[in-house]
């Protein structure tokens, strides 16, 4: 998963969910809701973040939904939403 176009070194939350909602929120659309877990991360100096992983053995197949909530002082509400992603595993 690659995130680009974030403010340099911006803190962000990666939300992960088992469901896809499409709620209007912070001037965009929030997809992974309700979140099952979240991770506090940060973009690099270029405003990018790259993540990768593998599906663990013996874990049942499922759909997962991901989205980043990025701190962004250039917008009135202070948060920009990335696009939402769906991963079908495995």
Image (spheres, rainbow, N blue to C red):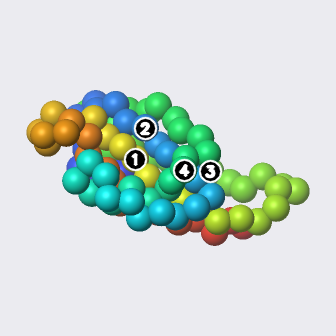
Q: Are marks 1 and 4 in contact (CB under 8 Å)?
A: no
Q: Nearer the viewer, residue 41 or 74?
A: 74
As measured in the structure, the alpha-carbon distance from the residue carrying label 3 to the one carrying label 2 is 18 Å
Q: Position of residue 67 (x, y in %)?
A: 43, 52
- Crowding at mark 4 (Cα within 10 Å: few <14, some 14-19, many 20+): some
Judged by depth in the image, the label closer to the viewer, 3 or 2, is 2
Label for residue 13?
2
Of the image marks 1 and 3, the number of the one nearer the N terminus: 3
x, y percent for residue 72: 21, 37
Q: Secondary structure at mark 4?
A: loop
- Label 2 crowding class (10 Å Cα cut-off): few <14, some 14-19, many 20+? some
The residue that mark 3 highlights is 53
As rendered, which of 86 and 78 lies closer to the eye?
78
Dividing the image into 4 quarters, which one contains the C terminus?
bottom right
Q: How far, Cα to Cα, is label 4 from label 3?
A: 22 Å
Name the residue carrying label 4.
34
Residue matched to label 1: 68
Label 1 and label 3: CA atoms lie apart by 17 Å
**Marks 2/1: CA distance?**
5 Å
In the picture as drawn, the residue positioned furthest to the right comes out as 58
Label 2 secondary element: strand
* Residue 73 visible, this orientation: yes
C-beta proximity under 8 Å, tags 2 and 4: no
**Which quadrant of the view contains residue 75?**
top left
Of marks 4 and 3, which one's residue comes earlier in the chain? 4
Residue at image location 13% in from the left, 40% down from the top: 76
Q: Quadrant of residue 29?
A: bottom left
Q: Between disc 3 and disc 2, whose residue precedes?
A: 2
């Amino acid at each position: 998963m690659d995130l680009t176009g974030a403010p340099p070194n911006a803190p962000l939350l990666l939300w992960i969910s088992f469901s896809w909602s499409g709620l209007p929120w912070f001037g965009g659309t929030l997809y992974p809701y309700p979140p099952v877990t979240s991770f506090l991360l940060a973009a690099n100096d270029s405003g990018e973040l790259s993540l990768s992983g593998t599906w663990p053995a013996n874990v049942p197949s499922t759909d997962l939904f991901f989205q980043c909530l990025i701190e962004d002082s250039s917008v009135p509400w202070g948060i920009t939403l990335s696009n939402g992603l769906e991963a079908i595993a495995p």
